[in-house]
């Protein structure tokens, strides 16, 4: 393999495009942990990749799926790669001559080693057969350099001591996490392979006695309509304030963890860990929430608590009450928790209290970024993510106050990103009765306004105001869908 254009003995210079994060070449800032050491690199492998792309124009598209300009250690290779990408984007041929002309037009031909080096690169490989394997090595070395550079930046900032240490920790975690997002893409799979996997899922579903294929919600009618919360789904639970969003989300968490043994991560941005624990205790024991808060418990209340607290305490529920947590931080913490304890569901209470790590002027854009991040979290961990959301006041102007998708607050992207959107509607709060005049006291309608892979409609639950808990509605009290007309 050719040795390429002359280089200094130290790390090669950074490309003029991008910054240190996007262009992880070198050992990091002066004084960092890589000082005096050659950073991870594989120059000969980079040469093989560039040579394969010059030799076979069809290899360019395959390489673009795996690489970017900033992943190369050798600056001339980055220039050459960038020139080939520019040609590819214009649907022009990629070969030694066209790349040389592209580099010349950009004033980078000499920096890239000249025409002679391009010829040496193309002559150095016999075929593009090993392109994917070689590209993976280049990516691995580039990410290793990124880790070195990130650790150097983190170390320098910590030594300087100019920022709040907790802000520094948050920044450091995001800095490391940004590297993990540069993983190789999955790529295409043939329909034959996908259909094989699909039929296996169908067979497993057919053999199951239960209709639940995802995380068991604990509510019979809800399971019938959704088959449980599905892995990879973003589920939005929305309602006006003080209608029962937190109570229902904690019921879902409790049912999954206690009854099914599913690990649940709870990000509580509104309530403290203690308040969340109180809610879970009330759901488990049906003790009056106000009595629990004030400590005015009767002997039988204490008996219920002591008898049931052990089962709840042993359940795999993990609570984080960091206020204003960013999506990146939530993703990093969820990944770590899944690795250490194995979780099957994430709950966020609630979406509008999260923040974005980017400086975004528009609140709508920020919420949009958050909802996309939560959907990415669901897909990455392959678990359902249940995110609570506030509704706008628009529903208050309607006669029956019935919520609908357009009421989702601050961003239409919530509806777009969500796989399932559910609303809590309690007609008794507005003094409404059923069409036949019957009282609806304690009856909650859970409206499934969107379900990407299932039906929409309504599920009815019983609301226990004293213990702030939802329960299955007895069959004799269930309301048929055609009867869902409420009157004053």
Image (cartoon, rainbow, N blue to C red):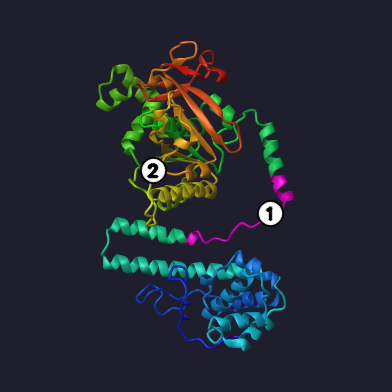
Question: In the rendered image, which quarter is residue 480 located in?
Answer: top right
The answer to the question of whether label 1 and label 2 lie on touching residues, with beta carbons closer than 8 A, is no
From this viewpoint, is residue 240 visible? yes
| Relative image position of residue 237 (x, y in whole percent) | 46, 35
Q: Which x, y percent locates residue 430? A: 38, 21
- Residue at disc 2, secondary structure: helix
Q: Residue furthest right?
A: 192
Kind of element beneath mark 1: loop
Does residue 275 lie above or below 78 as drawn?
above
Q: Can you identify the residue that label 1 sits on?
A: 189
User: Badge 2: few (under 14), some or many (20 or more) residues near its Cα, within 10 Å?
Assistant: many
Q: Which one is nearer the viewer's eye here, 424 or 477?
A: 424
Residue identifier under label 2: 352
Q: Quadrant of the C terminus?
A: top left
Per the rendered image, the range of residues in magenta is 179-197
Mark in the foreground, 1 or 2: 2
Question: Which residue sits at x=69%, y=32%?
Answer: 206
Vertical comparison of 27 with 230: above or below = below
- Above or below residue 334? Residue 90 is below
Residue 426, disc? none
- Cα separation between marks 1 and 2: 37 Å
Q: Looking at the image, which residue is at 44% across and 34% down?
A: 238
């Amino acid at each position: 393999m050719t040795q390429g254009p002359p280089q200094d003995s130290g790390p090669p210079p950074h490309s003029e495009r991008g910054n240190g994060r996007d262009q992880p070449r070198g050992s990091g800032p002066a004084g960092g942990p890589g000082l005096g050491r050659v950073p991870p690199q594989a120059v000969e492998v980079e040469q093989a990749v560039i040579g394969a792309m010059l030799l076979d124009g069809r290899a360019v598209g395959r390489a673009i799926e795996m690489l970017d300009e900033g992943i190369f250690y050798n600056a001339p290779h980055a220039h050459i790669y960038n020139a080939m990408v520019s040609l590819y984007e214009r649907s022009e041929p990629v070969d030694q001559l066209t790349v040389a002309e592209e580099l010349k037009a950009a004033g980078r031909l000499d920096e890239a080693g000249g025409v002679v080096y391009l010829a040496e690169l193309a002559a150095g490989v016999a075929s593009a057969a090993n392109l994917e394997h070689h590209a993976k090595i280049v990516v691995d070395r580039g990410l290793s350099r990124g880790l070195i550079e990130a650790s150097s930046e983190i170390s320098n900032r910590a030594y300087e001591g100019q920022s709040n240490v907790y802000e520094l920790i948050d920044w450091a975690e995001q800095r490391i996490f940004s590297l993990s997002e540069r993983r190789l893409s999955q790529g295409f799979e043939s329909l034959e392979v996908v259909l094989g996997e699909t039929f296996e899922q169908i067979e497993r579903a057919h053999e199951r006695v239960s209709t639940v294929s995802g995380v068991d919600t604990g509510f019979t009618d809800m399971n019938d309509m959704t088959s449980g919360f599905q892995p990879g789904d973003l589920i939005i639970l929305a309602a006006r304030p003080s209608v029962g969003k937190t109570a229902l989300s904690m019921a879902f968490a409790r049912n999954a963890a206690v009854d099914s043994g599913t690990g649940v991560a709870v990000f509580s941005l509104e309530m403290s860990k203690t308040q969340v624990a109180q809610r879970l205790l009330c759901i488990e024991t049906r003790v009056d929430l106000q009595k629990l808060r004030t400590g005015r418990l009767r002997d039988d209340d204490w008996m219920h608590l002591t008898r049931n607290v052990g089962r709840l305490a042993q359940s795999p529920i993990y609570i984080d009450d960091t206020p204003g947590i960013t999506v990146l931080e939530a993703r990093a913490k969820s990944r770590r928790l899944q690795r250490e304890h194995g979780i099957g569901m994430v709950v966020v209470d609630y979406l509008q209290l999260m923040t974005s790590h980017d400086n975004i002027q528009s609140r709508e854009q920020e919420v949009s970024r958050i909802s996309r991040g939560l959907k990415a979290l669901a897909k990455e961990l392959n678990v359902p993510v249940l995110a609570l959301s506030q509704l706008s006041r628009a529903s208050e102007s309607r006669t029956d106050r019935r919520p609908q998708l357009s009421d989702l607050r601050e961003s239409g992207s919530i509806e777009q990103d969500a796989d399932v959107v559910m609303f809590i509607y309690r007609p008794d709060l507005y003094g409404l009765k059923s069409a036949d005049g019957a009282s609806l006291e304690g009856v909650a309608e859970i409206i499934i306004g969107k379900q990407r892979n299932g039906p929409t409609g309504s599920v009815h639950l019983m609301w226990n105001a004293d213990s702030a808990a939802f329960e299955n509605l007895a069959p004799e009290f269930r309301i048929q869908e055609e009867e869902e007309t409420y009157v004053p």
